Amino acid sequence: MIVWTVANQKGGVGKTTTAVMLAAWAVSRGERVLLVDFDPHGSLSAYFGVDPEELSVSAYTLFQAAANGSTLPPEVVRPTGTTGLSLLPASIALATLDRQLSSREGMGLVLARALADPLRSYDRVLIDCPPMLGVLMINALAAADYLIVPVQTEPLALHGLERMVRTLQLVNRTRRPPLSCVIVPTLYDRRTRASRETLGILQSKTPISASALQQGLPGRVWEGMIPVDTQLREVGRSGGLLNQMIRPSPGALAYRELFEMIERERHLPAPAPSLRKTEETGVGRWTP
């Protein structure tokens, strides 16, 4: 099983679209893929026609089961209408987790343990995170083999990137090996000066040379970019059908290039076992 986490501590940067499109390209290769919605707003769940306010079992159930020592019900994972693609949906109850459970021992490893058993039958898992640091993001980072950080190509997005980089550095203090990542420029509109300049900033790293981005980040900025694509915005209306996700369009083809680039990197010499294969890391207890 390969686990990719999609995260940024700023909203509106394309996290959900990135998770969906990378999952679609994985399914197109014959993989069994699980999408995990960890955002209480439930944008990923809504993508597939699931209302986060009407669920009796959801990603929140993972944490209930962990806290109570109960068995995870099989219906917590739902089909999406696309063969090979399943969904662990969000519910609004996820917003209460930091208040309810963050002080309990082991709450930072709930997802990692669930993916080890009983949710171990998938080839690939993609996790869509909320735009804030808390027990949900810590779980997603702890379970990940690789981190994908979408960054909208507009100036204010750079501040969110620096916060995300600092969070990654904090997590990597207890990971051996460190969690590698790629920063992905998104929502690029070549017609606007702000978008062109921000893309140049991201790919040159010049204005943030003194920031955390230059201080040992185990990753890099992708040399490509995801353009603004109205066809991607329409995919959700179709119920997330695979043939709609990967039909030829500038955005879909850019996501294919991103997917293939990450896969090439994955086949480089392998590092030591990741965090989700060991609990001796100090991340098992999370206090925001």
Image (cartoon, grey):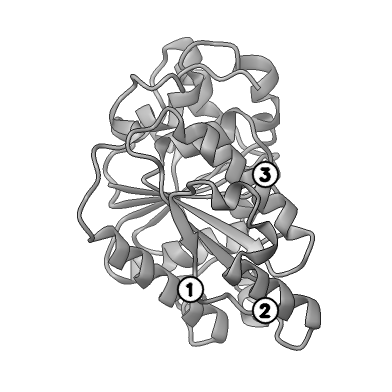
- The amino acid at mark 1 is Tyr
Residue at image mark 3: 163
Distance in Å between CA atoms under marks 3 and 1: 24 Å
Question: The residue tagged with tag 2: helix, strand or loop?
Answer: loop
Within 10 Å of disc 1 (Cα), the crowding (few <14, some 14-19, many 20+) is many
Q: Say few, some or many: other residues with alpha carbon within 10 Å of mark 2 (under 14 / 14 to 19 / 20 or more).
A: some
Give x and y (percent) for residue 229. 65, 81
Residue 149 appears left or right of 175: right
Percent x, y of residue 104: 54, 11
Q: Report which residue position mark 2 lands on.
A: 228
Q: In which quarter of the view is residue 144 placed?
A: top left
Tell me how far mark 1 sits from mark 2, CA to CA: 12 Å
Q: Nearer the viewer, mark 3 or mark 2?
A: 3
Q: Quadrant of residue 239?
A: bottom right
User: Residue drawn 33% across and 33% down?
Assistant: 176
For residue 255, side relative to residue 49 (left or right): left
Q: Earlier in the sequence, mark 1 or mark 2?
A: 2
Residue 187 seen by the camera:
no
**Mark 3 element type:** helix
Q: What residue is at 60 percent from the left and 53 percent from the top? A: 44
At x 70%, y 18%, the residue is: 99
Q: Earlier in the sequence, mark 3 or mark 1?
A: 3
Front in this rendered view, residue 176 or 248: 176
Q: Position of residue 2 (x, y in %)?
A: 31, 49
For label 1, the residue is 255
- Label 3 neighbour load within 10 Å: few <14, some 14-19, many 20+: some
Q: Quadrant of the C terminus?
A: top right
Q: Of residues 248 and 181, which is closer to you in this image?
A: 181
Report the amino acid beneath label 2: Val
The residue type indicated by label 3 comes to Arg
